Amino acid sequence: MSLRLTVSNISKNYNGKPVLRDCSFSFDSSGIYVLMGPNGSGKSTFLRICALLECPDSGEVNFSSGSNIVRKDTELRRRISLVLPKIGLFNTTVFKNVAYGLKIRGMKKKEIEERVDKALELVGLIHKKNHTALTLSSGETQRLGIARAMVIEPEILFLDEPTASLDPHSTTIIEEAITKLKGNNRLTIIMVTHNIFQAQRLADMVLFMYDGRIVDHGPNKEFFEKPKDERAYRFITGQMVY
């Protein structure tokens, strides 16, 4: 049974300043959910809390499989992956960087090789397999981060601005990889982006955040054609100054 995520009434403050205010949402089907909103709206904080990197000050984050809540932290971390804007690399080959998560799980060498090759093919880095990871460009490094997250075959993948500041070529490759992943009906992708056009290309469902709240959400076409919230409308039509 696929993993499902439900967020209930979460709030978060930094130095007394509210960053998230009573956010609730159920990611109850596979597909691509895109979080949008102006700078400072709380998107990345929301994502990090969902990915168990941070704890909310109040509210709950629950993962469930079927009718059962999954509470074991070690089990959850084996079933979810997070890609941040800055990727930390080991000073070794591209292959070994991607294989690391599988090795610590005790997988056999042949399965590791098959999975790593598949992940590197997905992000267009198979030709860099034996190169030192620290020699990669910024776009290639981001693609390596996605391969490393995908190689463990997560059920929920969190992406925080996966193409921020990248060249068009790397952006296209990453978007194509995300689109291919969408074909896996066991995978839920939750992604933050500032790029409205990217959201239109990739999203199944759009969540719009403003001032720490989820103020609008809806299926891709419905959201972009007729957003329910005036702030969402001003954001997607370029009328919002932030």
Image (cartoon, grey):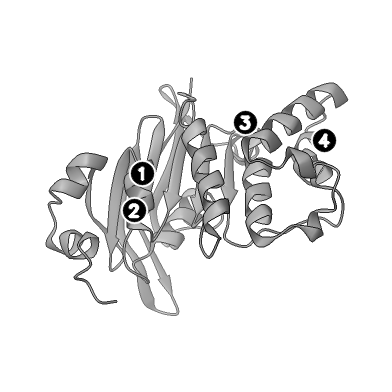
Relative placement, left or right, of 183 versus 28 is right
Q: Mark number for residue 153? A: 3
Q: Marks 1 and 2: in contact by CB < 8 Å?
A: yes
Up the image or down, 210 lies above or below 146; here it is: below
Relative placement, left or right, of 226 versus 134 is left
Q: Earlier in the sequence, mark 4 or mark 1?
A: 4
User: On the image, numbered disc 2 is attached to which residue?
Assistant: 197
Give the distance between the C-alpha atoms of the residues marked 2 and 3, in whole angstroms. 28 Å
User: On the image, numbered disc 1 is attached to which residue?
Assistant: 201
Q: Earlier in the sequence, mark 4 or mark 2?
A: 4
| Label 1: few (<14), some (14–19) or many (≥20) C-alpha neighbours in 10 Å | few
| Label 3: few (<14), some (14–19) or many (≥20) C-alpha neighbours in 10 Å | some
Q: Secondary structure at mark 1?
A: helix
| Of the pair 17 and 42, the residue shown nearer to us | 42
Give the amino acid type for the residue marked by disc 4 in the picture: Lys
Residue drawn at 57 percent across, 48 percent down:
82
Q: Secondary structure at mark 4?
A: helix
Q: Secondary structure at mark 2?
A: helix
User: On the image, numbered disc 4 is attached to which residue?
Assistant: 103
Up the image or down, 126 lies above or below 183; here it is: below
